[in-house]
Image: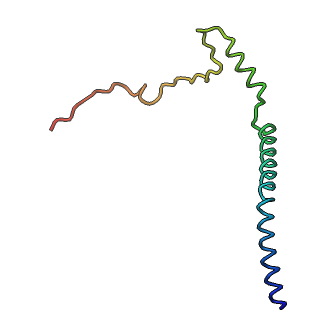
Amino acid sequence: MTFIYFLISIILFYYLFKFGMRLMLPFFMRKMAERLMGKQQQYANEGPFQQSYGDAFKQYSQREKRAEGKVQVDYMPPKEKKSKKGTATAGEFIDFEEVK
């Protein structure tokens, strides 16, 4: 008799747990996703390499205000010194064809 009560209680617990998880799991998953998204947004806004959106918008609006047809160069790489080494000082080269 005790064994039958034990089996009934196990089966009842299984179905109650299954029903409860169907109701509660979506709620917990939504809360966990919101928390993760909040942490990600906080990191994105305060990250070490992040530029604020206000600065980017200001730069974009300044680019739009320029006169049309004008070119502005923001960065020019440093000029390399030309040194005469290798083929520049080696002398004159003569092209030839190999004859068989």
Q: Residue furthest left?
A: 100
Position of residue 16 measured from the top left corner of the image (x, y, whole percent): 81, 69
Q: Is residue 63 above or below residue 87?
A: above
Residue 27 appears in which quarter of the rendering? bottom right
The image quadrant where one finds the N terminus is bottom right
Residue closest to the eye, 78 or 10: 10
Which residue is pictured at 73% across the width and 25% down the height?
56
Residue closest to the eye, 14 or 28: 14
Which residue is pictured at 62% across the width and 21% down the height?
76
The image quadrant where one finds the C terminus is top left
Position of residue 37 measured from the top left corner of the image (x, y, whole percent): 77, 45
Position of residue 99 measured from the top left corner of the image (x, y, whole percent): 16, 35
Residue closest to the eye, 34 or 78: 34
Query: Count of labels shown?
Result: 0
Q: Residue furthest bottom?
A: 1
| Residue 86 as seen in the image, left or right of residue 33 | left
Q: How is the image coloured?
A: rainbow
Residue 29 appears in which quarter of the rendering? bottom right
Q: Is residue 47 above or below residue 27?
A: above
Residue closest to the eye, 9 or 53: 9
Position of residue 32 measured from the top left corner of the image (x, y, whole percent): 80, 53
Residue 2 appears in which quarter of the rendering? bottom right
Which residue is pictured at 82% across the width and 49% down the height?
35
